[in-house]
Image (cartoon, rainbow, N blue to C red):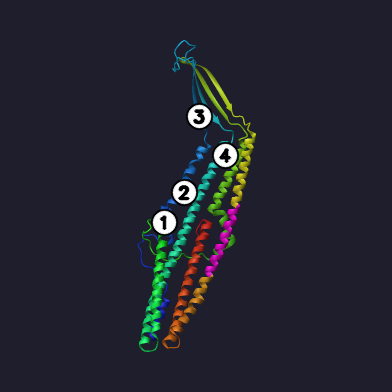
Amino acid sequence: MNGFRRGLFLALAAVCWNAAPAADETTPGRSVDSLLAYAREHNPEIAALRFEADAAGERVVPAGALPDPKFRTEFRDLTRMGEQRATLSPSQVGSTKYLLMQDLPWYGKRELRREIAEQEAEGARGRVRGAWNEVAARIKATYAQLFYVQRDAELAQEILDLMARLERVAQARYAGGLAAQQDAIRAQVEQSAMRNELLLLENERHHLRMRMNALLARPADAALAEPAAARPLPAPARLDRAALEDRLRAQNPQLFADESRIRAAEKNRELTYRNRYPDFAVGVSPIQYQSAVREWELMVEMNIPLQQSSRRAQERESEALLAAARARREATTWQLLAELAENLGGLETARRSELLAANQLLPQAETAFRAALAGYENGKVDFATLLDAQRQIRQARRSLLKAQVEAQMRLADIERLLGEDL
């Protein structure tokens, strides 16, 4: 029985360490990078935001341009004092006046409108980055969940194979009158439970694949490669909270968009105050008599800013919008800093949980299983004790996997907040 016992233990010790099956290199899914590269090119939400950002960039030039000039024609004295029937021929009416006119905003208004459009375009580009970070974070989290479910299914299959071997041990002991038939039945019950769990895991993997394909803008049933490995975690020295907070303030796309909104509000306030000054229009007007131009006129026009109550209300509105943009940025900053601290704490806890499972829980569970298996073979412990021992090993393995996946999820959230990979 010693050889059989060694085989059982080696089979259990190999749980979750099997290599992933080979996959087509052109199929995304083996790594996070392959998924991100595909999504960057095909995700329609990101494409739509890029087009919107391009459209916002194209508004800059028109915002700072002069209005189109205006041309006007006036036919005067169509009947020439009643001497003829009415006509629209310039050479036959009393006179024809041509007016070419150009609107001229007050000094600085065009520049301010252009700068407002530039800040709005910057904000649109920031929203593209923010949306991409959200999509990338969801892809990374879904990949981590797929990795966990795949490894958990491999673990369940290993336990199922182990229970089949334990059933054979129980059957042999029952045939020799050393154990009750109930031991073999309990092993069969455990196998049925593991098969049911495998079905549940396969269903969960199916849902995760559909979710991933949705993020990639692929058909729900499109093939995905099996995750090959979890992403490496950054060294603890790179997770200094103060340094990451500075990077968040400098690079977070949401804060970048809020800052662009503040600058646009400042320019809009300045433009509103410049509306206290009048805009002008200038024009030149030749006047034709019969077939010759005999007079020239020069025209200057300006609006008179008399509606002071309306302008003061607009100015107060611009001040309130600026204050709201600043308050929104401050609120966003504190919220993001809180999320960063929470995720850093969660990542550290996951690291410690992984070390605890790998260095203490798993070795202790393996030792307990070896002792229980030897005791069962010698008739010193019952089958229930052996089952509990193998459950403890599985629980230790699952704790190790959960800690790894939790760390990956926290890392994805931290990178989303920073706007870049660590």
Pick the residue in front: 268 or 308.
308
Q: Earlier in the sequence, mark 1 or mark 4?
A: 4
Spatial CA distance of label 1 from label 2 is 17 Å
Q: Which residue is rendered at x = 45% and y = 83% of the image? A: 372
Q: Which residues are magenta?
A: 330-351
Residue type pointed to by label 3? Pro
Main secondary structure type of the part rendered in magenta? helix
From the top left corner, tell me how far across and down residue 59 is, in percent: 50, 40
* Residue bearing mark 2: 49
Q: Is residue 201 magenta?
A: no
For residue 1, which quarter of the picture?
Answer: bottom left
Sequence order check, earlier mark of 4 and 2? 2
Camera sees residue 246? no
Judge the density around disc 4: few (<14), some (14-19), many (≥20) Cα neighbours within 10 Å. Answer: many
Distance in Å between CA atoms under marks 3 and 4: 21 Å
Residue highlighted by disc 3: 69
- What label does residue 131 carry, if any? none
Camera-side mark, 1 or 4: 1
Q: Earlier in the sequence, mark 3 or mark 4?
A: 3
The residue where tag 1 is placed is 214
Q: What residue is drawn where x is 48% and y is 58%?
A: 137
Compared to 282, does 61 lie above or below?
below
* Marks 4/2: CA–CA distance: 25 Å
